[in-house]
Image (spheres, helix red, strand yellow):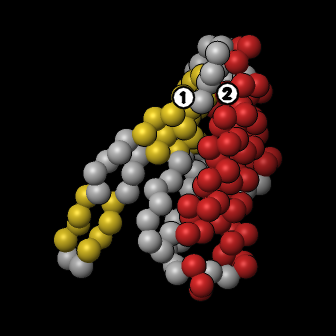
Amino acid sequence: MFQGDLTKVENITEFFDHTITRFGGIDVAINTVGMVLKKPFTETTESEYYLMFGINSKAAYFFLQEAGIKVNDFTMVTSLLTAYTCLYSIYAGVKAPVEHFTRAASKEFDDRGISVTAVAPGARIRLSSMVKKVPMQFHITNLHQH
């Protein structure tokens, strides 16, 4: 198992290299890196903003970049997006660029047959002692356009 701080680009590179060394190549790469901060919009600090942006946006960008360099041709790269619910303004905001990074990567990696997609699975909301499941609205967007 590989563990590392993926806000440091060199760790993302090492992660891909380690995987290729161990398995001989990469056919599917899924970016699930993320950190959630549940806090009112008016109480989010600048340091929390930069922490959340580094984990949720920067890591996703450089994960997609490294995938574009190192995955096998005719493969799939997927990123998880976010749910937009109350008290998650910073999380939703810093995850939003991932959709656009995914769209750009899908166009740039097209010539190698690499499918780049984004998945937005919806949200679960805890209400007092019971869990209410929000209708899933499982959203798969293939941003690859011919």
Placement of 46 over or under 74, stated as above or below: below
Q: Do the residues labelled 1 and 2 touch (CB within 8 Å)?
A: yes
At 76% from the left and 25% from the top, the residue drawn is 108
Placement of 51 over or under 74, stated as above or below: below
Circle 2 is placed at which residue position?
106
Label 2, residues with CA under 10 Å away: few <14, some 14-19, many ≥20: many
Placement of 143 over or under 63, stated as above or below: above
The kind of residue tagged 1 is Asn
At 70% from the left and 18% from the top, the residue drawn is 110
> Going by the picture, which residue comes out furthest to the right?
10
Residue 102 x %, y %? 65, 37
Residue 113 x %, y %? 65, 14
Circle 1 is placed at which residue position?
142
> Going by the picture, which residue comes out furthest to the bottom?
43
Residue 24 x %, y %? 64, 19
Residue 104 x %, y %? 72, 34
Q: Is there any visible trace of residue 20 in the rendered image? A: no
The kind of residue tagged 2 is Ser
At 32% from the left and 66% from the top, the residue drawn is 125
Residue 33: mark in rendering: none
